[in-house]
Image (tube, rainbow, N blue to C red):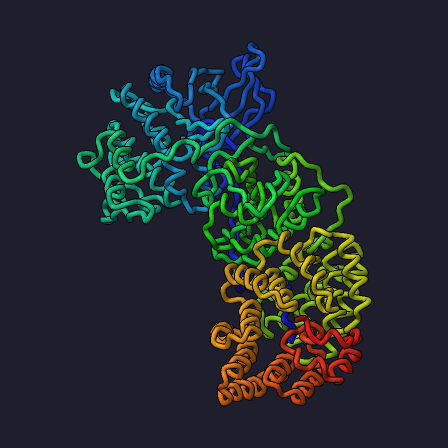
C-alpha cells in the first residue's frame, strides 16, 4: 500500500441543488440608496428611467444610474455650469401635492443646517417638469446594507462594528440636538466611504418633531417596516426614541447578521410576545442596553443615543478607527470589467480580520514580498449548502490562474484550505502563509444562477483593495474566474502572463463536464476505496460529456491508480497509465499532468528513467508548483538520494507551508538519514497542522522505534485511524517492548484483514520483528500486487535488517533499482 503522500485532505458530500431564484446585480456604492437583497426591484419600469446624457433643469447631466431605493432612483450627475463638479440626485417616483412638496423643502432646509462630518450634505429640492429630485453630495463607498450582504449574513465582530456604531450614533445625536428626526434609519442609509468615513444618509426625507413629511398616499414609503418602531407603524408623530429603536435594530443586525425579531415587524413581534435573543458577542450589560433600546413601548425605551452608546461601550471601549474603516485610499483606480464598476477600496475589515495590525515577520523568514497572495477557500452560501465541491473547485482554479502570473507568489491549495472552516484573522493567516495579500469570497448557486463575490485584502492594514460581485449563469463560470484573476492582478499592479496555458479544470466549455470533474476531485480526497470507485465513474461521466477533457482523463488515471493500490488490481495500473497518457496528449504543457505520470511510473511501473524525464519536464514548466517539487523530492528519495530529496522537499514546504503532507515527507526523509532532531521538528509541524495525520503519526512512531523508545512509539501508533497502519505499528512497538503475544496478535489481525492492500506494511512488521524469511515472502507478494509501498524500499529504515541479505539486492533489480553497494547497507 502506497503512503499516498500527495493525497489532499477529505471533504464533504454533495446534496442536491436548490431551486431557482432571482439574483440582483451588486451595487458598488450609492448615495442614499437601498439595493434590495436578492430580489430585483419592480417599483419602476424601464420607461421611468432617465437616459444617459439627459439634462435636469438644464444644468445637471445624467452620467449613470447608481441604483434604486423605495422612494426613488439615484443617478450620478455632472454640473454643466461648474467644471468638474458632480452630485448624486434622487429622482422621486411619486409626485407630491403642493403641501407635501413644501414640507419636503422644509425638511431639506432643516437638514442643510446639520453641518456634521458624519452626515451627507443635502443641497436642495428641485422640480423639472413632472420630475422632483433631491440634489445631494456624491460619495465613493458602500452602504452598510451591501457590506452585510457581502459578509454572508455572519455579522461583524464588535471591534469592527463599534467605530461605525459610534459614528452613526454621533451623527444621530447631533441631529436630535437640532430637532431633526431621521425616521428611516436602516443599513441602506449608512454609507462607509472609501476615504474612511461613516456617513448617515437620507435626512432629506426625515421629519422634524412638529409635523409629518408626506401625505398619506406616500406615507408608507417614508419608513422601512423592518426597522420601524410600533409607534411609527401606527402612524404616530415621530419621536427621537423611534430613531433609537431603528438604530438598535441596525446595531443588532451588524453584530449578528440577523434582525432582532427576524422577519416580524415590531407590532407583530410585540403581539407574539417575542423577546430579543441575546447576542453571544456581547456581555450581559451590553445585551441589556440593546434590549432597552428595542423596547416596544416608547415609555420603556432608551431616551437618548448617548445612553445607548454608553451602555454598549461599558465592557468594550472603542478600539480606534484604525480597527474598522479605511484611512486614506492606498490604491488608485482599478480595472473596469465589462459593465461592472469596481470600487476603489473595500470599506471595512473582513470578518476574519479580528485584529488589524502589521504582520510580524518570522525571524527565520525573508521579508514578505508585496507580490504575494493567498486564495482562501470560497464560502458556499447556497441555501442548502450543497455547493461545497463547486466552491472548492473555484478556489483551486483561482490558485491555478494566479499562480501563472510571473513573480507572484501564491501558496498552494493545501495551505490555503488549511483555513477552511476556521476563524483565523487575516493578519494571522497572512503571517502563517508569508503573504502580503489575501483573496476571499463566496458562491451562492441557485439552479443555473450564480452569485460570486470576491474581495482582495491587504494583510498588514486590513484594507480592502478591491471587491466585486458577479451575477451570472453557471455557463459563464470560466469567464468569471478569468475576470476575478484579472481584477486581482490589476489591483496588485502586475501583468498577466502572456500566452498562459489553461490549467487544472480548464480546457472544457461544457459546464456539466466541469461539475462532474469537480465532484470527482472531491471524491478523491476521501481516502477510501468506495469513494475512489465512485470517482472513477464520475470522471468517466465527465469524459462522456467532453471526450477531449484532459483534466478528466488525468483524474480518471489517479482514481484508477488509487483503486488498484487498495485492491491489487494490476490491470487498473495499466488503465491508469493509459488515461494519464491521454491527458498529456490533450494538454502537453500541463506540469501537474507530468508530475502525476512521474509518480505513476515510479511507484507502480518502476519506470525510473521515464519518471525522471516527466518530473524534469514538470519542473521546467512550473518550478513554483509545490506538488511538482514534492513529487521530485519523492523520486529522489526513492532513488536513495536523500540529501537532494530533503532540499527539494524544503522547497515544497516553502511553497505550501501549511501542508501536513509536505512536512511529513520532509520528516520521513530526515529519519532516512538518521537526523531525528530535524525529523521531530518537521513531524511536529505536520501534526500541529493535522493532528490526525496517519502518515505523520506513523513516521513519529517509527522514529521512536529506531531510537528504542517503545512506549512512545506505541502511543503514536495507537492514535492512527487507518487500521492497517495502526496494526503494523502496534505489532512493531509491542515487539520492541518485549510483548511477544501482543505483537503476534496485532500482526495476525493485520494479515487477516489487510493482506490484499497492505503486503508491504506486513513485510515491514516482519522485518522489524526479525522474521527475515517471512518479510521477503511478503515483499514478493507486494511485488506481485504492484504495491506502491515498494517504491520506498531502497531507503526505508524499517527494512535495514534485510539489506545485507542477497535477496534484498535481487528484489531491487526486479524493481529496476540500482543494487546496494557493500557500504550502503545502512544510513547510520
- In this rendered view, identify the residue nearer to me: 445 or 567: 567
Percent position of residue 179, x then y: 27, 20
Screen quadrant of the C terminus: bottom right
Q: Which residue lies most toward the top here?
A: 81
Q: From the viewer's perspective, tell me whether residue 205 is left or right of residue 759.
A: left
Q: Residue at x 51, y 49 (%)?
A: 21
Percent position of residue 162, x then y: 36, 36
Q: Quadrant of residue 102?
A: top left
Q: Which residue lies most toward the left here?
A: 299
- In this rendered view, identify the residue nearer to me: 496 or 233: 496
Q: Quadrant of residue 755?
A: bottom right
Name above or below for residue 715 compared with residue 442. below
Name above or below for residue 304 compared with residue 624. above
Whether residue 11 is visible: no
Q: Residue at x 26, y 29 (%)?
A: 306
Percent position of residue 592, x then y: 72, 58
Name above or below for residue 755 compared with residue 689. below
Q: Quadrant of residue 696?
A: bottom right
Number of dots carrying numbers:
0
Screen quadrant of the N terminus: bottom right
Percent position of residue 718, x then y: 48, 75
Q: Residue at x 68, y 36 (%)?
A: 494
Whether residue 258 is visible: yes
Q: From the viewer's perspective, tell me whether residue 94 is left or right of residue 65.
A: left
Amino acid at each position: 500500500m502506497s503512503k499516498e503522500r500527495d493525497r489532499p485532505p477529505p471533504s464533504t458530500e454533495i446534496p442536491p441543488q436548490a431551486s431557482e431564484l432571482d439574483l440582483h446585480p451588486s451595487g458598488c456604492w450609492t448615495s442614499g440608496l437601498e439595493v434590495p437583497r436578492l430580489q430585483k426591484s419592480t417599483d419602476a419600469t424601464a420607461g421611468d428611467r432617465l437616459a444617459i446624457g439627459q439634462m435636469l433643469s438644464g444644468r445637471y447631466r445624467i452620467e449613470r444610474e447608481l441604483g434604486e431605493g423605495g422612494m426613488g432612483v439615484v443617478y450620478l450627475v455632472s454640473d454643466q455650469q461648474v467644471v468638474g463638479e458632480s452630485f448624486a440626485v434622487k429622482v422621486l417616483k411619486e409626485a407630491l401635492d403642493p403641501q407635501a412638496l413644501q414640507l419636503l423643502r422644509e425638511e431639506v432646509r432643516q437638514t442643510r443646517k446639520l453641518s456634521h462630518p458624519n452626515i451627507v450634505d443635502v443641497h436642495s429640492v428641485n422640480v423639472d417638469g413632472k420630475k422632483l429630485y433631491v440634489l445631494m453630495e456624491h460619495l465613493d463607498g458602500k452602504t452598510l446594507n451591501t457590506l452585510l450582504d457581502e459578509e454572508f449574513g455572519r455579522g461583524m465582530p464588535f471591534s469592527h462594528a463599534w467605530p461605525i456604531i459610534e459614528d452613526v450614533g454621533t451623527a444621530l445625536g447631533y441631529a436630535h440636538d437640532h430637532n431633526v428626526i431621521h425616521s428611516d434609519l436602516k443599513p441602506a442609509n449608512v454609507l462607509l466611504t472609501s476615504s474612511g468615513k461613516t456617513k448617515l444618509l437620507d435626512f432629506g426625507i426625515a421629519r422634524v418633531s412638529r409635523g409629518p413629511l408626506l401625505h398619506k398616499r406616500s406615507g408608507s414609503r417614508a419608513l422601512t417596516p423592518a426597522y420601524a418602531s410600533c409607534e411609527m407603524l401606527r402612524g404616530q408623530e415621530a419621536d427621537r426614541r423611534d430613531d433609537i429603536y431603528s438604530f438598535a435594530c441596525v446595531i443588532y443586525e451588524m453584530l449578528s447578521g440577523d434582525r432582532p425579531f427576524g422577519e416580524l415587524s415590531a407590532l407583530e413581534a410585540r403581539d407574539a410576545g417575542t423577546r430579543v435573543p441575546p447576542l453571544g458577542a456581547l456581555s450581559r450589560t451590553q445585551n441589556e442596553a440593546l434590549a432597552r433600546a428595542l423596547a416596544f413601548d416608547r415609555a420603556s425605551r432608551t431616551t437618548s443615543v448617548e445612553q445607548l452608546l454608553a451602555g454598549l461601550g461599558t465592557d468594550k471601549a472603542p478600539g480606534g478607527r484604525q480597527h474598522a474603516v479605511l484611512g486614506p485610499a492606498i490604491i488608485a483606480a482599478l480595472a473596469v470589467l465589462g459593465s461592472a464598476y469596481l470600487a476603489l477600496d473595500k470599506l471595512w475589515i473582513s470578518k476574519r480580520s479580528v485584529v488589524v495590525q502589521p504582520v510580524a515577520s518570522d525571524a527565520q523568514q525573508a521579508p514578505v514580498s508585496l507580490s504575494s497572495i493567498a486564495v482562501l477557500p470560497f464560502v458556499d452560501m447556497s441555501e442548502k449548502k450543497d455547493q461545497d465541491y463547486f466552491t472548492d473547485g473555484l478556489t483551486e482554479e483561482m490558485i491555478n490562474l494566479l499562480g501563472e502570473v510571473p513573480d507572484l507568489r501564491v501558496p498552494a491549495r493545501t495551505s490555503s484550505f488549511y483555513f477552511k472552516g476556521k476563524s483565523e484573522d487575516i493578519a494571522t493567516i497572512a503571517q502563517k502563509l508569508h503573504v502580503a495579500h489575501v483573496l476571499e469570497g463566496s458562491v451562492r448557486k441557485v439552479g443555473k444562477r450564480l452569485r460570486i463575490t470576491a474581495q482582495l485584502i491587504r494583510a498588514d492594514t486590513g484594507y480592502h483593495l478591491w471587491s466585486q460581485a458577479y451575477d451570472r449563469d453557471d455557463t459563464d463560470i470560466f469567464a468569471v474566474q478569468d475576470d476575478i484573476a484579472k481584477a486581482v492582478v490589476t489591483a496588485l499592479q502586475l501583468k498577466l502572463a502572456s500566452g498562459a496555458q489553461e490549467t487544472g479544470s480548464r480546457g472544457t466549455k461544457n459546464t456539466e463536464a466541469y461539475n462532474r470533474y469537480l465532484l470527482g476531485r472531491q471524491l478523491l480526497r476521501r481516502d477510501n476505496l468506495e469513494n475512489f470507485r465512485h470517482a472513477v465513474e464520475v470522471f468517466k461521466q465527465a469524459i462522456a460529456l467532453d471526450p477531449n477533457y484532459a483534466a478528466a482523463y488525468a483524474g480518471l488515471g489517479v482514481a484508477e491508480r488509487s483503486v488498484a493500490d487498495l485492491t491489487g488490481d494490476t490491470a487498473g495500473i495499466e488503465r491508469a497509465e493509459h488515461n494519464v497518457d491521454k491527458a498529456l496528449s490533450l494538454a502537453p504543457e500541463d506540469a501537474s499532468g507530468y508530475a502525476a505520470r512521474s509518480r505513476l511510473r515510479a511507484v507502480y511501473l518502476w519506470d525510473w528513467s521515464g519518471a525522471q524525464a516527466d518530473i524534469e519536464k514538470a519542473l521546467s514548466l512550473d518550478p513554483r508548483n509545490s506538488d511538482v517539487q514534492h513529487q521530485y523530492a519523492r523520486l529522489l528519495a526513492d532513488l536513495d538520494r536523500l540529501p537532494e530529496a530533503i532540499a527539494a522537499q524544503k522547497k515544497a514546504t516553502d511553497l505550501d507551508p501549511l501542508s501536513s503532507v509536505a512536512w511529513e515527507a520532509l520528516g520521513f526523509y530526515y529519519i532516512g538519514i538518521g537526523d531525528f532532531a530535524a525529523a521531530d521538528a518537521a513531524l511536529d509541524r505536520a501534526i500541529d497542522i493535522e493532528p490526525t495525520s496517519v502518515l505523520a503519526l506513523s513516521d513519529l512512531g517509527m522514529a521512536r522505534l529506531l531510537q528504542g523508545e517503545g512506549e512512545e512509539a506505541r502511543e503514536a501508533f495507537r492514535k492512527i485511524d487507518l487500521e492497517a497502519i495502526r496494526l503494523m505499528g502496534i505489532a512493531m512497538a509491542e515487539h520492541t517492548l518485549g510483548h511477544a503475544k501482543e505483537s503476534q496478535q496485532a500482526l495476525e489481525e493485520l494479515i487477516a484483514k489487510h493482506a490484499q492492500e497492505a503486503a508491504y506494511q506486513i513485510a515491514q512488521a516482519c522485518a522489524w520483528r526479525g522474521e527475515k524469511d517471512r518479510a521477503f515472502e511478503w515483499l514478493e507478494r507486494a511485488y506481485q500486487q504492484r504495491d506502491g509501498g515498494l517504491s520506498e524500499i531502497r531507503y526505508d529504515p524499517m527494512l535495514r535488517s534485510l539489506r545485507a541479505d542477497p535477496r534484498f539486492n535481487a528484489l531491487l533489480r526486479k524493481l529496476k533499482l540500482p543494487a546496494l553497494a557493500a557500504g550502503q547497507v545502512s544510513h547510520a
